[in-house]
Amino acid sequence: MTFPPQPGANFPGQYHGGATPYHGGQVPPAGPPGYGGFPPPPPRKKKTGLWVTLGIVVVALAAFAVTAFVVPGFLVEEESKSKRAAKPYTAEDTTVQEETAQDFGRRVKDALQAGQPDAVTPLLCPDATEELKTFAEGLREPQPLTHVSVNGGIAGEDEKKGITRAVVPLSGSAVGHSDVDGEVPTSLLFHKGADGWCWQDLRDIVSYLEDFRDALNAGDLDALHSMQCSGEQLGMLSDPLADAIALGEKWTMKDPSHDPGASNVDFVGGDATLDIGISSTSGEFCVMSGFLEK
C-alpha cells in the first residue's frame, strides 16, 4: 500500500522551498541573535590598564635607580638598618660589635650609680693603681652622676692608642676627702687591653691641688712645670711659678672653686697670692693659668 506524502516531510533530494538546508556539518554563518546564528564574539579588551601598570613600575624602578646612584651607601645603609633591627646591639654583646670607650663609660656610670664594690671591681684593669683599688673597695654610696663623657683625644687619636679619660663628680667621702662638702671633680683613666676596655686609675682635683702645693713648698719647679697644660705658657715677662718659689714662703691653699671643665684656687704665702687656674676639658687636670700678686 502506498501512502501519499505528508505535508512538511522532506525526502532525500527534495526541496520544497524555505530556508536553504545545511549539509555536511556546515556551521551556519554568524548573525544577530534571533536569526538562527551564534552570538558575535565579545569585543576585544582594551590594554589601557596594562599600560598604566607598566608605567608605574617603570617610574618606581627609575626612582630607585636614581636614589641608589645619587646617595652613596643607600643600599648598604638600608641593609645595615635591617640587620640592626633584626639583632639589637647591647653593650655587653662584644662578640658581634666591639665595645667602644663610650660604651665602657656607660658601664662605669652604672657601676658608680650602684655605689658598691662588687659593681665597680669587675671593671678594674689587672694593673689598676692602688688609689683606684682603695676607692673601689671602700665605695659604699651611690654617686651623683648622670653620665660619663669619655674624651678620646683630638680626632679620637688617644682612643685609637687605647687610652681615654673622663672627669666626673664624686662625693668627697668616696674619694677620701670627708672634710669636703659637695662634689669633687675626679679624673678617670681608661685603658684598652687584649680583653677590651678597663678602668686603670682615678685622680680627684683635691689631691691634685695638694700635690701642686707640696711641689710649690718643696721648690720643685720641674714638678710644677710638668703639671702645666701642654703648650701653655704662664706669665708674659716672667714665670709666676719660679717667682713664687723665689719668695721662700710657706704656701697654703685657699678658696678652691670648681666649675665644669675648670677649677680655680689661690695659694697664699705671706703677703703674696698665687692664683692658679686648672683645666679638665681633656679629661685630666693641668695648670692652664697662673698669676702672682705680691
Image (tube, rainbow, N blue to C red):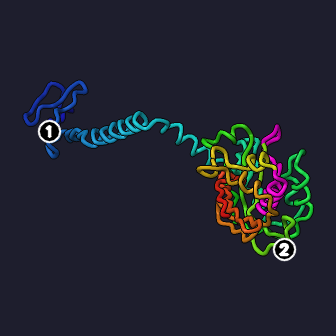
Q: What's the amino acid at mark 2?
A: Asp
**What is the crowding at mark 2: few (fewer than 14 residues within 10 Å), some, or many (at least 20)?**
few
Q: Residue at x 76, y 73 (%)?
A: 182
246 relative to 39, above or below:
below
Answer left or right for 245 relative to 259. right
In the displayed image of the protein, which residue is found farthest to the left?
17
Local secondary structure at mark 2: loop
Q: Which residue is mark 1?
A: 31
Check if residue 11 falls in the magenta segment: no
120 relative to 200, above or below:
below
Answer left or right for 31 relative to 46. left
Q: What's the amino acid at mark 1?
A: Gly
Q: Residue at x 8, y 36 (%)?
A: 18
Q: Residue at x 67, y 50 (%)?
A: 239
Task: Give how far across and how far down residue 67 sits, in percent.
Answer: 40, 38
Q: Nearer the viewer, residue 7 or 150?
A: 150
Q: Nearer the viewer, residue 144 or 107?
A: 144
Check if residue 210 falls in the magenta segment: yes
Q: Earlier in the sequence, mark 2 or mark 1?
A: 1
Image quadrant assignment for residue 172: bottom right
Task: Give how far across and how far down residue 208 sits, in percent.
Answer: 79, 58
Quarter placement of the C terminus: bottom right
Task: Give how far across and how far down residue 158 sits, in percent.
Answer: 69, 41
Q: Which residue is mark 2?
A: 179
Which residues fall within the magenta stretch? Answer: 192-219
On residue 121, the disc is: none
Image quadrant assignment for residue 154: top right
Quarter placement of the N terminus: top left
Residues under numbered marks 2 and 1 in contact, where contact means CB atoms less than 8 Å apart: no
Task: Give how far across and how far down residue 290 sits, in percent.
Answer: 66, 57
